[in-house]
Image: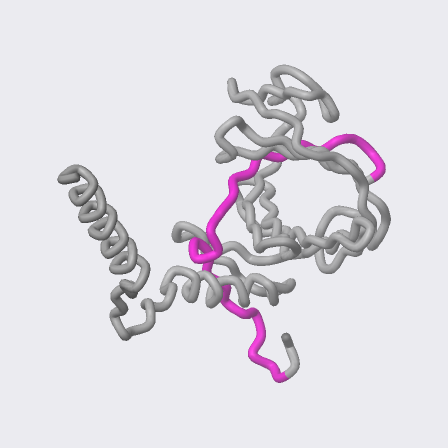
Amino acid sequence: MWWLILLLVLAAAVAAAVVVVRTRKPATTGSRPPGDVIAENDLASVEPLRRLRVGDIVEYQGAMLFVRGRLDFDESGYTWTEHFLDDAEARRWLSVEDDEGFEVSLWRSIPAGDVEQGAPGDRDVIVGGVAYRLQERGSASFRAQGSTGTAPQGTAEYVDYASADGKQLLGFENFGGSWEASLGEPLQPWELTVYPGSDEPGAR
């Protein structure tokens, strides 16, 4: 009989422990979590880039780049903008996409001869010893403002590539003539500072 009594005692102890565990409430601090400072800073940097226009100045790594023109693309409702920046060293474009997320990247044109292997549309293209994998391709209508070197409006084809780590980009665009190649890098909005080119009311 002693083993039966021992078994009943153990069962009662287990039941009591289960009750304690189930009725225990998690500790609360009584304070709200701190705000996302990084996200707030990003938002402050994003808004000027959304409003970027011809005549503004973009500062990047100490260089002041004048916005000479812009191209507004539309591919079946998906839109993005490319801003032509005045840079003495190279032909540069700042791409801004604001659809399923805000993305900004800086591009510089390269000669077609810099492409070591592959062509627009191939699965892999090599430039400067870096292998780029095809990401997407398509065509979009565009409208131009300011100085862009393109027609005022029309249709352009594009082919986009990225390196394996996603830190380097390669793009091809065709505005009705030959393919133009560019190398790019994704940036964080806070890496760029926008200085409006006009303080006139209604300029934005």
Rendered residue at 54%/67% (across/down): 47
Q: Position of residue 202 (x, y in %)?
A: 65, 81
Vertical relation: 167 (above or below) 96: above
Residue ranking furthest to the front: 1
Rendered residue at 60%/81% (across/down): 200
Taking 81 as reference, is 30 left or right?
Answer: left
Q: Nearer the viewer, residue 26 or 116?
A: 26
- Report if residue 187 lies within the magenta region: yes
Rendered residue at 59%/51% (across/down): 85
- Report if residue 11 lies within the magenta region: no
Q: Nearer the viewer, residue 193 or 44?
A: 44
Q: Nearer the viewer, residue 61 or 11?
A: 11
Q: Position of residue 149 (x, y in %)?
A: 74, 47
Taking 9 as reference, is 79 left or right?
Answer: right
Q: Position of residue 145 (x, y in %)?
A: 74, 59
Vertical relation: 154 (above or below) 59: above
Vertical relation: 33 (above or below) 119: below
Q: Position of residue 120 (x, y in %)?
A: 73, 25
Which stretch is magenta? 176-201
Q: Nearer the viewer, residue 90 or 155?
A: 155
